[in-house]
Image: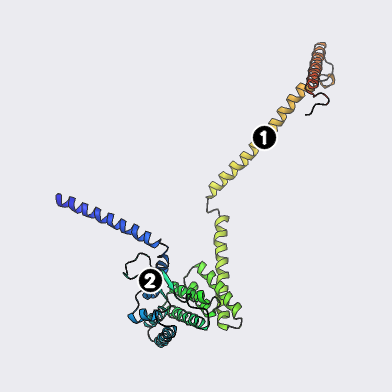
Amino acid sequence: MEEDEHAGNMEGMQDVLKAAAGIKTTQLKLRPGRQDWERAPDWIKYTSWPETDILALRQGCLGTRLARCEELKEQGNKLYEQDMAAAIQVYSEALSLWVWFDRGRDRASEDIPWVNSVDALPEGPDKEHVKEVVVALFNNSASCLIKMNQPESVVYAASKALEYDPYNVKSLYRRAHGHYHSGTSSGLEKAVKDLKEAQALEPGNAQVHATLVEYSRELLLQNKKDAAVFGNMFKRGELYTAHELEVMRQEAQAAKQAAAQQEIGADEEESRRAKEEDDPPLLGRNKAKDPSPMAMQQALRQMQRGVTRAGARLEADKEKAPAKGVLI
């Protein structure tokens, strides 16, 4: 009995610890200094574990760092046709000379910011050359990831390249490929958008044009399909059953008629009261062709009462009227 109770307590404690760990993980992901890390694919996270020589080169002169980067880039190009995973790892190492995730010296920091040393370089031809190399490395990484069937990582790599060169046609084309292969309608729309930008930059690019035609046709068919699906959903009344729709229609019609009838009744009642007070019946309005003396006397009395009331209202109006020379 005690053993069962102990086991139950242990399970409860494990659940509490698991829930606490989940809360802590969520809090970490929401930290501003960690969001880039959480969104990044694994291949670029490798930049947070650089080799010793990379750490030293980051602090060295620009020429030495650039020479090592070019060397790694060529090495990755050679691996491209043989081993995609190895090639992208080399590309990542080359990129880590310029951009990286910084885990701090103790490697236990909750914040893992993205460091971009390219922006810190002095303006000039050297900085522009570094940008070109970084763009090429991200584009080559995107090409590897296309063959590795990792569309989200393709979009990430191409987007990073576009941060340094917003008008790079290769980056736009490869990002469009990643968006398209996400398999979503929004991805297809984004792919067409990227390809339109690429074609505007290079109207004579046959590959971009052919892919744009293909994706645009597919987007058109998708839009027609969506319009048919959602349009028919409302036409068929799928949000409500046919019975519910008929009941609502009848209730709305009945309410409309009741409101109209009430308004007519109010108008008639008001007209009747006004007629009784201000327009007593004349002799000629009686239904009888030859009214009796009693009816004649009753009509005369009604006329006298009407005249008396009219005179009283006239005197009251005179009393209420302001005297001459008094401002209203």
The total of numbered circles placed on residues is: 2
In the rendered structure, which amino acid carries the disc numbered 1? Gln
Identify the residue at horizontal 18%, vertical 52% (top origin). 6
Q: Which residue is mark 2?
A: 102
- Secondary element under disc 1, as helix, strand or loop, is helix
- The one nearer the camera, 248 or 43, is 43
Residue in front for this viewpoint, 120 or 129: 120
- Quarter of the rendering containing residue 253: top right
As drawn, 102 above or below 235: below
User: On the rendered image, what quadrant is the C terminus found in?
Assistant: top right
- The reply to whether residue 44 is visible in this rendering is yes
Tell me the element at label 2: loop
Residue 112: quarter of image: bottom left
Mark in front: 1 vs 2: 2
Crowd rating for badge 1 (residues with CA inside 10 Å; few <14, some 14–19, many 20+): few
Left or right: where 325 falls relative to 11: right
Task: Give x and y (percent) for residue 273.
Answer: 73, 24
Along the viewing direction, whichever of 163 and 85 lies nearer the viewer: 163
Residue 14: x and y, percent? Answer: 25, 56
The part of the image, by quadrant, that contains residue 316 is top right
Residue 161 in the image: state x and y as whole percent.
49, 76
Q: Earlier in the sequence, mark 1 or mark 2?
A: 2
How many residues crowd around disc 2 within 10 Å: few (fewer than 14), some, or many (20 or more)? some
Q: Which residue is mark 1?
A: 261
Q: Label 1 vs label 2: CA separation?
A: 77 Å
